[in-house]
Amino acid sequence: MQFLDGFSEKLNALGSDVTQASQHLFNTIKMVCETIDIDETDNLYREYEGDYLYFVESGELDAVTEGNAVYCFDKGDLVGIQVLTGFPLPTIRAVTPVTLSRIDKKTFKEVATGSTQFKNYLLQLSAFFAEACCNGLDTAPETKASFKNYKQGETIIQEGDPAEEVYDLISGRAVVYVQGQEVGQVSAGEIFGAMAALTQTPRTATVIAERPCTVMAVSMDEFTSLIRSQPHTCLILLENMAKQILALDQKLVDVMGKNKNGNANASKV
């Protein structure tokens, strides 16, 4: 996986790491994938409808935004990770013949999302895009941020609301809920609310102050400028995303363990 403009040695290396992680993931699930051959297509997800993810077996695909190819997928790369979350997809184009292995979203979730290979892929992908945002840009613009205070129990972010700002927790601690279930915490120094803002989708979680909190709120436009100019901010964001992935994985393990014990106890009754 690589960007078609603004190359740097580090970005190239990170792109290779993404491809390698994707290939390792594919090797664990390829037995449930279906191979298809495509001569060319202007829009893969328009021509082949359905909630599919694809691995490139041969050839190359381009990710196109506003008519311009921004980055490309090489042999081994996973295409369509956004399908899992409902985030907007770029236009995926093939100008030469390609061979793809596809897998539907439901099956992918069942066989891949809990694996170590998938977690590693997400971490490599996050590092790749964080470096791309920072690549070659080191002048910090003036950012207009507002500071907000929340009492214990007050809602900072409400699931389903439009995402217009990104937050940095200056002090305090907050709890993250998805559909009423606690899935994690936000501690001082962590950035939160970025994913929905960056993808222009509704909030996917509710964040409630566990103790009095002070947050810095930055508008989406200014946050985009900030991450393009300050590598330190990108690294913090990447670190937070990695922590969230690991925390959610542990939450899943705990829930599965409880269900397993519950079923075992029920069988003894």
Image (cartoon, rainbow, N blue to C red):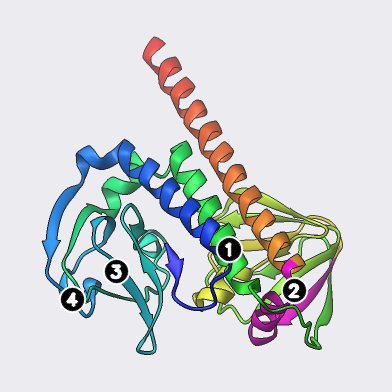
Is 250 on the left-hand or right-hand side of 144?
left
The tag earlier along the polypeptide, 3 or 1, is 1
Q: Nearer the viewer, mark 1 or mark 2?
A: 1
Which quadrant holds the C terminus? Answer: top left
Give the magenta-colored segment's residue range: 214-231
- Element type where label 2 sits in the image: loop
Q: CA distance from mark 1 to mark 2?
A: 19 Å
Q: CA distance from mark 2 to mark 4?
A: 37 Å
The tag earlier along the polypeptide, 1 or 2, is 1
Give, as a three-letter code, the residue at label 1.
Glu
Q: Position of residue 132 (x, y in %)?
A: 58, 70
What label sits on residue 41 in the rendered view?
A: 4
Look at the picture and state if 27 lies above or below 170. above
State the residue position of label 3: 61
> Residue at 79% of width from left, 86% of height from top?
143
Q: CA distance from mark 3 to mark 4?
A: 9 Å
Is 259 on the left-hand or right-hand side of 141?
left
Q: Position of residue 131 (x, y in %)?
A: 61, 66
State the residue position of label 2: 230
> Residue at 54% of width from left, 57% of height from top?
14
State the residue position of label 1: 9
Q: Quadrant of residue 67?
A: bottom left
Look at the picture and state if 41 lies above or below 123. below
